[in-house]
Image (spheres, rainbow, N blue to C red):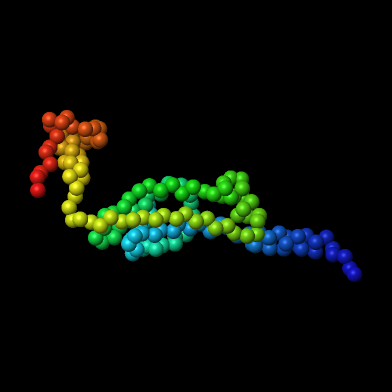
Amino acid sequence: MSALSIPQKRLSLAVLALALALAACRAQRHLLFETDPPGASVRLDDEVVGQTPLDFLFQHYGKRQLTVYREGFRTHSSEINIRPPWFSRFPLDFISEVILPFGWRDVHRFEIVLEAETGRGTESDLAAVLKRAESLRRAGPGGPQEPDAALPADEAPAAPQP
């Protein structure tokens, strides 16, 4: 049996290191969106990503703006916070995504029940719109100084009666 020469050993080690690096799998990150009823469009931040039921692969954790809408139903909009699991936090993320030769699956599920559109806003919706309109009407050229400030009760516009 012949022993390997030093250059052959280095080459073997380099090939082994390359094989281990290529065998490591990065975590699969999934956002699952389900709505009742299905078939709603899903917008994540400023991009429409598909229709429900939807399995969306994402890259980054953090706060995202979610908007779900469907014809005949009220639009659902909320901020979601996608938190990383333990294996995706520093410094464990280096070990789990580069050194270990198997991938992880990180799934975040969102179930949303859409409300049917009645065709009319509620009294509270109308009162809020009228209050905001009055604050904009009274604002100067620089716009309203306090956008959420309540108007005095005697100056608040009355909601029209149906």
Residue positioned most to the left: 161
Q: Nearer the viewer, residue 44 or 17?
A: 44
Point out residue 40 in the picture as x, y percentages from the top left corner.
Answer: 33, 61
Residue positioned most to the right: 1
Q: Residue at x 52, y 55 (%)?
A: 106
Point out residue 146 in the picture as x, y percentages from the top left corner.
Answer: 25, 32
The mark total stands at 0
Q: Nearer the viewer, residue 122 or 131?
A: 122
Residue positioned most to the bottom: 1
Q: Is residue 67 above or below residue 145?
A: below
In the visual, does 3 lie left or right of 42?
right
In the visual, does 75 lie left or right of 104?
left
Q: Residue at x 65, y 59 (%)?
A: 101
Q: Quadrant of the N terminus?
A: bottom right
Q: Is residue 29 above or below residue 80?
A: below
- Can residue 133 be seen by looking at this rendering? no
- Can residue 105 be seen by looking at this rendering? yes
Q: Nearer the viewer, residue 15 or 46?
A: 46
Q: Is residue 127 above or below residue 58?
A: above
Q: Residue at x 36, y 59 (%)?
A: 35
Q: Residue at x 14, y 34 (%)?
A: 156
Point out residue 157 in the picture as x, y percentages from the top left corner.
Answer: 12, 37
Point out residue 19 in the picture as x, y percentages from the top left corner.
Answer: 68, 63
